[in-house]
Structures are given as structure tokens and as C-alpha cells.
Amino acid sequence: MVEGFRVALNVLFISASVAPHHRGGIGRFVTEAAHGLVAAGARVGICWPGGSWIENGVEVFGASSDTGPRHWSRVFTWQDYASRYAAAIERSIDAGPWHVVHLHDWLVAPSLPSVGRLQAPLKVATLHTDANLAVGASDQRRALRIRWERQVVECADALTVCSLDMARRVATRYVDSRVEIVPGGVNTQVFGRPLVTGRFHKKVLFFGQLIRRKGCDTFLRAVSRVLTEVPDLEVEVIGSGPEAERLALLAKQLCIESAVRFRGRLDGRELGDEVASASVACLPSREEPFGLAALEAMAAGAIVVASRTGGFVDFIKPGFNGFLCRVDDDECFADCMLNVLNGRIPYGVIARRGRETSDRYSWEAVAENLLDVYRATL
């Protein structure tokens, strides 16, 4: 039984993404928050358009009973989503009753015609992203996102976002909505490491999706500057995505292809080990709703150099627990990395403060924040 509720609370998440079967922060948030709620005493299910399985006390209701592969090919049509969500929700009905239906981001809008069948007394929506942050998206795609996003918001009894920046954006668009901030968390089993502050490797890395919004091209341009002073620098790019070939070509054009290792996508402890082996995690996103990767890097002991945008500014205090640069300012990113690599800043002190910052963002805290939202609204 969850404290504050007279009966055990049954929460059903609806999401287009479930980790680790899709890249990005939404799937990680959905999966880790579900596990946190289970640890707090709630019963949690997830409806999504993929397969079905049970893991760590969370039952995943998919569009099919097939447990493998646990992913599906995204098709951006209302009809395809609606039919998949309807099948998943049908599977979840017999497992009810559900006290809370929690809708995650705009891609769940096609589920709304079926959500009513769940007869849940409370509907909560979380907007993890903002249509205006979709760098490079067409006007048609952005209009679709805004339309679906509005439908999700209008059906919800409560609305949460991940950062102050997102709260401002959402409050401007939906002036009648009450917005609560529930930031993401860090999986310390994956990223937590004992801090070794007496020495560090001359290694910098970028990790994240290889899409234009994440700014890996800025990282490569900054690295080309750093290599002129630190020629033995180790450089890694971890991630996959549609920009991979263009970034490899850029590395060649910058004459740094021999110094940069493109590792592809890594997950779990393997990713945590690589981040922990670096002195600097460089995250030059052009837009970032929250910036979970920065907290993960802090937990691993790397010093974070990130863009002064979005959620990064909520928890990175320049010169105290990391560094911030203007978007696309590769000279600033290079200078910050060089300050770390050349010992011009107190590496151990800043790494320790970064770890202390990440410690405040646990998934247990996320679960408690969500329960507070449910309590205040039920």
C-alpha cells in the first residue's frame, strides 16, 4: 500500500517508448519511474505499441503478446498508433482497475479514444519534449506534434514537465494548465562509480543520439581545436542516429578522423563504464528539454561541459559543478575542455560537486514526486 492512499495505488503508464528498446530519455524515464513507483508500493503497468512482458514487477502490455523483439517500427500515422494502443489497452483492462492513467508525451494522443475504457479516476500527462525544440523538423511535422500535444494536455487532470524551461514553454501555450516540475533521475547502478579524483584520463566523449539537436558537430569542431594542444587525447562519440555518416565525414574534413572513435550505441553498464573513464563529457545540445545525460555523466565522475540551454541550466552551475557554453560556440567548448585537461581548474572538487548534484536526482525521488502529484489531484 502506498503511504497516503487507503488502497494500493494502481498506475498505468501509456507511452510510445520503453527502455532500452528505444533511444532517448522518454523511454528511460518511463521505465525507471515505473520501477521507482513499484519500489514505493504501487502496482504499475505500461501500455505501449510493442510487445508484452513482465520485468522487475512492472507488467508491460503491448499491442501483441510477442515478447521478442520488444520493439516496433515507428509509423507516424494516427491509424497505426490508434490500433496498436487500442490492442495494448485491451490487454490491460482485465489487469485493472487502474486508479491513475499517466500519459507520456505527444505520441500517445492516438490512444485517447481507447483510454476512456479504462475508467480511471485520474489522468496525468507529462510533456517530455516541446514541438518547438524539434530542430530541423518540417512545419507540417511540427504542426502535427502541436495538435497531438494539445489533445493530450486537454484530456489530463494534471500536467507535469521536466524542467523550468519546459514549464515556461508549456505555461505560455496552455495558460489554463497547472504545471508541476518532475525532473528525471539517474540509475546509480549503471552510472554510479567511486570517485577517483587524484588522477584523470586525457579522454573526452560525447554520448547521445546522433541527431542535429544534440550538437555532436559542435563537439567535433571543439575537439579539432583541443587536439592542437593535447595531441594524445582520446576522443569517443557514443550513439547512433541519422547524422552518423555526416559526422564521420565532418571528422574527416577536420582531419581528426584518426583521433575520433565512433562507438555506436552502448547501453547499461557498458555505457556507464565508458562515461566513467572520461575526464569530460561534452554535451553541446542546441535544445534540451531536461538533459539527463549530464546528470548521468556527473554520477560517473566526469566533468560536464554543456550548452546554456533548456534543462541544463537548472542544475549546472558554471565553475561550481560543471561548465556552460553558448549554443554552437565550439571555441568555448574547446577552452573548457582544455581547462580540465591542462589542470587549470580543480578537477577533483568540481567532479565531487557534480556527483553530489546527481545524488539529488534519484529515481526514488522521481517516484515520490509523481506520488505527490497523484495525491494532490485524486
Image (cartoon, helix red, strand yellow):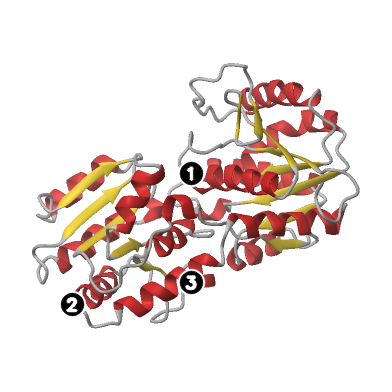
Q: Residue at x 44, y 69 (%)?
A: 355
**Residue bearing mark 3:** 356
Q: Amino acid at mark 2?
A: Asn
SS at badge 1? loop
The CA distance from mark 2 to mark 3 is 24 Å
Using the image as rendered, state which of residue 262 and residue 97 is in the foreground.
97
Point out which mark residue 304 bears.
none
Q: Amino acid at mark 1?
A: Ser
| Few, some or many residues within 10 Å of mark 1 (<14, 14–19, 20+) | few
The CA distance from mark 1 to mark 2 is 43 Å
Q: Residue at x 69, y 64 (%)?
A: 172
**Residue bearing mark 1:** 138
Earlier sequence position, callout 1 versus callout 3: 1
Residue 322 visible in the displayed image: no
SS at badge 3? helix
Q: Residue at x 59, y 28 (%)?
A: 77
Please provide percent x and percent y for residue 158. Answer: 79, 54
Point out which mark residue 342 bears.
2
Q: Residue furthest right?
A: 6
Q: Amino acid at mark 3?
A: Glu
Please provide percent x and percent y for residue 118. Answer: 83, 31
Please provide percent x and percent y for residue 3. Answer: 82, 55
Using the image as rendered, state which of residue 264 and residue 241 is in the foreground.
264
Earlier sequence position, callout 2 versus callout 3: 2
Q: Contact, CB < 8 Å: mark 1 with mark 2?
A: no
Image-based side of 134 in relation to 325, left or right: right
Which tag is nearer the camera, tag 1 or tag 3? 3
Quarter-wise, where is residue 144 in the image?
top right
Q: Contact, CB < 8 Å: mark 2 with mark 3?
A: no
SS at badge 2? loop
Please provide percent x and percent y for residue 6. Answer: 91, 49
